[in-house]
Image (cartoon, helix red, strand yellow):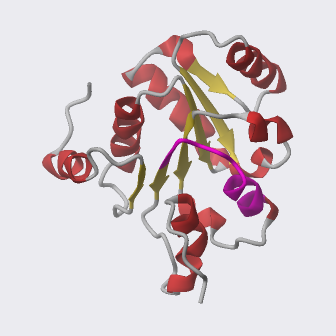
Amino acid sequence: MINLFQHQQQALDETEGKNRVAYYLDMGLGKTFVGSEKMMKLNKRINLVVCQCSKVQDWIEHFQDHYTRNCVFDLTNPKTFKWFFEQVQHEVPTLMIGVINYELTFRRKILKTLNGFTLMLDESSLIQNENAKRSKFILGLHPDNVILLSGTPTGGKYEKLWSQCQLLGWNISKE
């Protein structure tokens, strides 16, 4: 368990018991820690973190530094991706955290076979165009839990939140 700031703990407290959450915190307020702590509290064996390509290594280092080194997989590496799925299929009881960038998600079609996992999207605003390949693919996944992180969830146009609302389980029309 990490020592959180009061505002971070409050965000977790307010979402206690919820398995589909969005943490829209301004830059510098520690979304990474809030999201990773929520992921640990949700306690799923399989966890998938989707982020920008430039943040993959940051997420890997975050989990290795603050949780456990042995459970983090760089899913941008084809060999590691294959190893991750071998572990998933063999139902190894160990905590597994796979980190991948948005552009690779829809190219790794086997991700669609994941079930019973937690999905965390860093900069979830990157799926605001529900017609984009990455958005369609992510919206087609079947996570048990969803954690959305963003400092700017929309550029002021609320209809751009529609795809994020879908992941949160809000079955509303775009209109």
Residue found 29% across the figure and 44% down from its top: 17
Q: Position of residue 73 (x, y in %)?
A: 64, 23
Quadrant into which the C terminus falls:
bottom right
**Front-lying residue, 20 or 123:** 20
Q: Position of residue 126 (x, y in %)?
A: 63, 64
In-image side of 35 versus 161 (left or right): left
Q: Is residue 47 magenta?
A: no
In-image side of 96 versus 149 (left or right): right
Q: Is residue 143 magenta?
A: yes
Could you say which quadrant of the image residue 76 lies in? top right
Q: Position of residue 81 (x, y in %)?
A: 77, 25
Q: Position of residue 59 (x, y in %)?
A: 52, 36
Residue found 76% across the figure and 55% down from its top: 137
Quadrant into which the N terminus falls:
top left
Residue found 46% across the figure and 70% down from its top: 152
Could you say which quadrant of the image residue 139 lies in? bottom right
In-image side of 24 versus 113 (left or right): left
**Front-lying residue, 144 or 78:** 144
From the viewer's perspective, is residue 144 above or below residue 15? above
Q: State the residue lying farthest toward the left.
A: 6
Residue range (magenta): 134-146
